[in-house]
């Protein structure tokens, strides 16, 4: 496996910062969720892809029980004793690193102290799961350095997924549902990952838009996206409230054909809108997987549009920038467009004919400029592979 340029850079950074060579470099991808938003914590379905943009970690074991981490994206290093890792400590970005070691140790694994240097090409705050990319790159490193041998099989990788989810939920205190970490550990080149968040079963679905003359354009709207600001958690709470009123264990138990009677049982319109989004979104994921398997990109585009409308109107997680990016993409010929990720900012995606990519990205940039918004960043992505050792 050839070494990516950023892998070499992070190895050099490690040597400069620590005065020794790393024992290896590991990486994991960011993700784009094609469809299936806010379904993961409702035991639903989602359909993400891994990105070519990755987070890289160079690491080596220490003789003591200390974790030291540096990041090219942060000004200061963080040092913490492994015995001192707990919810909220360390704070900030280092929690995603320390939390992985904490979670694996909690599961009975013998985890060493580490020196870790980090560099990333995954945009932070763009809704492209930079946090899970960091967690999974670190988890891959720990698996190798601690001799856990978990990268060689899907069951082993699922063990790492669960550790990364525990790290983010408990130590970083961010209420994510597991889709992001599953994608980073289980995705494949030119495939989407159909993930059942109840059984954690997965199925690979063909995803090669270029073969049909199209491209997936991601637009980082530069509108701040932060999962720990309470909005994401409030949607989870509303789903739990709806479950209590319905007397169910999961919104996955509401079939789309039985949606109207279920909505009639709810006490207020907010809960009805939240449930309608989740139930119809799960159904859209099934239809999207079928559309990809049959090569029907027009149908996939229609599902993108319906998904965005549902997130905008029923789940209320879109924003001015996301609506402008998706509306503009459709206006210049996208087959479909939707926001992706947790919402309240972040990124949008659009299925665009290859010969219209430049026109689409220019139109989005012009629309943002006309609205006096921060300039967005648009780029084309293909489905990338999972967390692995780089060399």
Image (cartoon, rainbow, N blue to C red):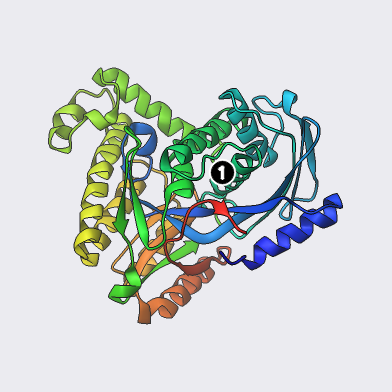
Front residue (pair 109, 213): 109
Please state if 127 lies on the left or on the right of 237 as rendered.
Answer: right
- For the C terminus, the image quarter is bottom right
Please state if 41 lies on the left or on the right of 168 as rendered.
Answer: left
Q: Please state the total of marks drawn on the protein image.
A: 1
Residues packed near mark 1 inside 10 Å, few (<14), some (14 to 19) or many (20 plus): some
Q: Residue at x 35, y 59 (%)?
A: 191
Q: Is residue 348 above or below residue 157?
A: below
Percent position of residue 390, x then y: 60, 58
- In this view, the residue farthest toward the bottom is 355
Query: Is there any visible trace of residue 380 in the rendered image?
Result: yes
Please state if 59 lies on the left or on the right of 216 as rendered.
Answer: right
Percent position of residue 34, x then y: 36, 55
Percent position of residue 375, x then y: 57, 67
Q: Is residue 95 above or below residue 351?
A: above
Q: Residue at x 73, y 28 (%)?
A: 82
Please state if 275 lies on the left or on the right of 117 as rendered.
Answer: left
Front residue (pair 231, 29): 29
Q: Residue at x 42, y 26 (%)?
A: 237
Query: Is there any visible trace of residue 221 in the rendered image?
Result: no
Say what secondary structure mark 1 lies in: loop
Q: Is residue 24 above or below residue 112?
A: below
Q: Is residue 79 above or below residue 206?
A: above
- In this view, the residue farthest toward the right is 19
- For the N terminus, the image quarter is bottom right
Front residue (pair 237, 180): 180
**Residue 247 sits in quarter:** top left
Front residue (pair 60, 295): 60
Percent position of residue 226, x then y: 56, 43
Q: Residue at x 43, y 63 (%)?
A: 325
Label 1: which residue?
226
């Amino acid at each position: 496996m050839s070494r990516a340029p950023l892998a070499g850079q992070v190895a050099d950074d490690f040597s400069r910062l620590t005065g020794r060579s790393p024992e290896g470099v590991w990486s994991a991808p960011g993700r784009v969720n094609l469809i299936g938003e806010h379904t993961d914590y409702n035991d639903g379905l989602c359909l993400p892809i891994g990105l070519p943009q990755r987070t890289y970690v160079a690491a080596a074991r220490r003789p003591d029980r200390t974790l030291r981490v540096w990041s090219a994206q942060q000004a200061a290093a963080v040092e913490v004793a492994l015995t001192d890792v707990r919810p909220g400590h360390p704070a900030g970005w280092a929690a995603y690193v320390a939390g992985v070691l904490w979670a694996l140790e909690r599961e009975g694994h013998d985890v060493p102290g580490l020196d870790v240097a980090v560099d990333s090409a995954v945009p932070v705050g763009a809704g492209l799961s930079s946090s899970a990319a960091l967690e999974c790159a670190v988890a891959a490193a720990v698996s190798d350095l601690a001799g856990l041998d978990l990268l060689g099989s899907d069951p082993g990788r699922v063990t790492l997924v669960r550790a990364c989810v525990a790290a983010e939920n408990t130590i970083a205190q961010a209420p994510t549902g597991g889709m992001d970490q599953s994608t980073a550990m289980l995705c494949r080149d030119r495939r989407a990952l159909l993930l059942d968040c109840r059984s954690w079963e997965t199925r690979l679905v063909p995803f090669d838009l270029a073969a049909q003359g199209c491209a997936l354009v991601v637009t980082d709207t530069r509108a701040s996206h932060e999962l720990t600001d309470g909005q994401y958690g409030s949607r989870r709470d509303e789903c739990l409230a709806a479950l209590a009123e319905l007397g169910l264990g999961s919104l996955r138990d509401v079939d789309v054909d039985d949606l109207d009677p279920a909505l009639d049982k709810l006490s207020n319109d907010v809960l009805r809108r939240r449930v309608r989004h989740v139930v119809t979104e799960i159904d859209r994921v099934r239809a999207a997987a079928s559309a990809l398997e049959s090569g029907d990109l027009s149908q996939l585009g229609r599902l993108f549009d319906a998904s965005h409308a549902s997130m905008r109107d029923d789940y209320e997680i879109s924003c001015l920038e996301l609506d402008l990016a998706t509306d503009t993409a459709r206006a210049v010929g996208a087959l479909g467009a939707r926001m992706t990720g947790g919402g309240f900012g972040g990124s949008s995606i659009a299925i665009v004919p290859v010969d219209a990519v430049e026109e689409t990205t220019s139109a989005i940039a012009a629309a943002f400029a006309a609205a006096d918004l921060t300039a967005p960043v648009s780029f084309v992505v293909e489905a990338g592979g999972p967390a692995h050792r780089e060399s």
